[in-house]
Image (tube, grey):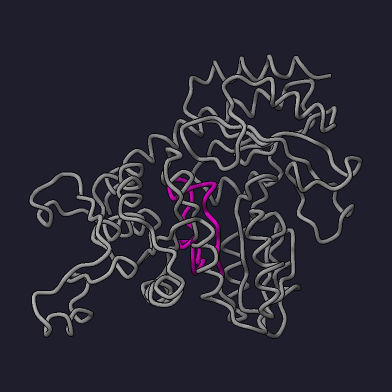
Amino acid sequence: MPGFETLCAHAGEDPRRHCGAVTPPIYQSSLFTSPDCEAFAARHERWPEVYDYTRVANPTTDVLEAKLAALEQAEACRVFGSGMAAVSAAILHCVRAGDHVVAVDSVYGPTRALLTGYLKGLGIETTWVRGEDPEEFARAARKGTRLFYLESPSSVVMRLQDLEAVAEVARERGVATVVDNSWASPYYQNPLALGIDLVVHSATKYLGGHSDIVAGAVMGSAERIQQIASREGVLLGAVLDPFASWLMIRGVRTLALRMERHQQSGLAVARFLEQHPKVARVHYAGLESHPQRALAVRQMRGSSGLLSLELKDGTREAAFRFVDSLRWFAIGVSWGGYESLALPVGFVPEGKIPGRAPFVFPGITPPAQEVRWGVRLHVGLETVDDLLEDLSQALDQIP
């Protein structure tokens, strides 16, 4: 099998299909016409050689999907117009009204909202677990459980799940498994190779890598992806625009290079913060001190640029002052682009707020005394010494 970097450059591409163009063209068209009525009537029999409507399939997007499938060691991939569209499609593929889901409590906030709000209204219940022990899933499963939803590592507290062990627990019970692999990217982790059924990505993040698209992806077996494409994809219609597909093709070409730099700089920042007297704790799956270090080394090939820290001061005021004092870290949601970002985050002590996520962001915060405030950082592609100097001077501004 070709190496990862070779797949980034060439997987899914055939210049002979595009007049020898080394870069696939952007088929910026909503529909594709047929030469006659018989050809139109037979169009689905000849797909993917024949296209009819971009909501169903598009030549530019097909190149992207083949490339992403190869990177994630999947049989097939379907891309969507956002990460949440991909997450929603994967979950809806697995559950129906009356079903039950077991999910890790540190998932991405909108995913939690989807499960606790929207899907609960459709009669789908969710039980939350920390997820560090595979037996948690076994204990939480019941008659009607159809899905284990994972996020490893999770994007704020960096908890890992033993994907191979959880997949085995799921298979024994006939339960599907979905993993959000956005943090590690396919460069550092391949959950399908560990027995997981479906992988989802917020492709807005590392796959796109330049903060200029909003996209999502689901990877898995050809059978599952075909079902998702023809149902959740076509019927819910969260299609990815051909230009966004082309931008992601371009972004993926440098994925390996970018991830190496994100890891190198992310680890340097995490180690610096871990030794700083004003920092109480650093959450980063690449640190030697991570409580699940052995699992991280066994399950992943490296780490990314996303981490979080708890401040010893722990107040909202200190976290805000620290972030406001940064020069090279912009204040904003999302992560995975070229730029460094910072966002205040509150860490919820265990048992303080039963059923709540272990973290909160400004604007949806419980009373201040119930959280220790800190910061989520995305370490971008800037010169790491500039970032370290910036973090140092910002920490000097707080008690």
Q: Quadrant of the C terminus?
A: top right
Q: Is residue 31 left or right of residue 354?
A: left
Q: Position of residue 32 (x, y in %)?
A: 20, 67
Q: At 52% across and 21% down in the image, what residue appears?
A: 384
Q: At 74% across and 70% down in the image, what residue appears?
A: 127
Q: Position of residue 371 (x, y in %)?
A: 85, 42
Q: At 13% across and 74% down in the image, what residue appears?
A: 34
Q: Nearer the viewer, residue 231 or 91?
A: 231
Q: At 51% across and 75% down in the image, what residue appears?
A: 93
Q: Nearer the viewer, residue 351 or 285?
A: 351
Q: Position of residue 159 (x, y in %)?
A: 68, 50
Q: Position of residue 132 (x, y in %)?
A: 70, 57
Q: Nearer the viewer, residue 56 or 283?
A: 56
* Residue 192 is covered by the magenta coloring: yes
Residue 399, compared with residue 293, is above or below; it is above
Q: Quadrant of residue 212?
A: top left
* Residue 260 is covered by the magenta coloring: no
Q: Is residue 329 left or right of residue 372?
A: left
Magenta range is: 177-199
Q: Is residue 45 left or right of residue 198?
A: left
Residue 57, compared with residue 352, is above or below; it is below
Please identify the residue farthest to the right as the structure is shown. 369
Residue 43, compared with residue 102, is above or below; it is below
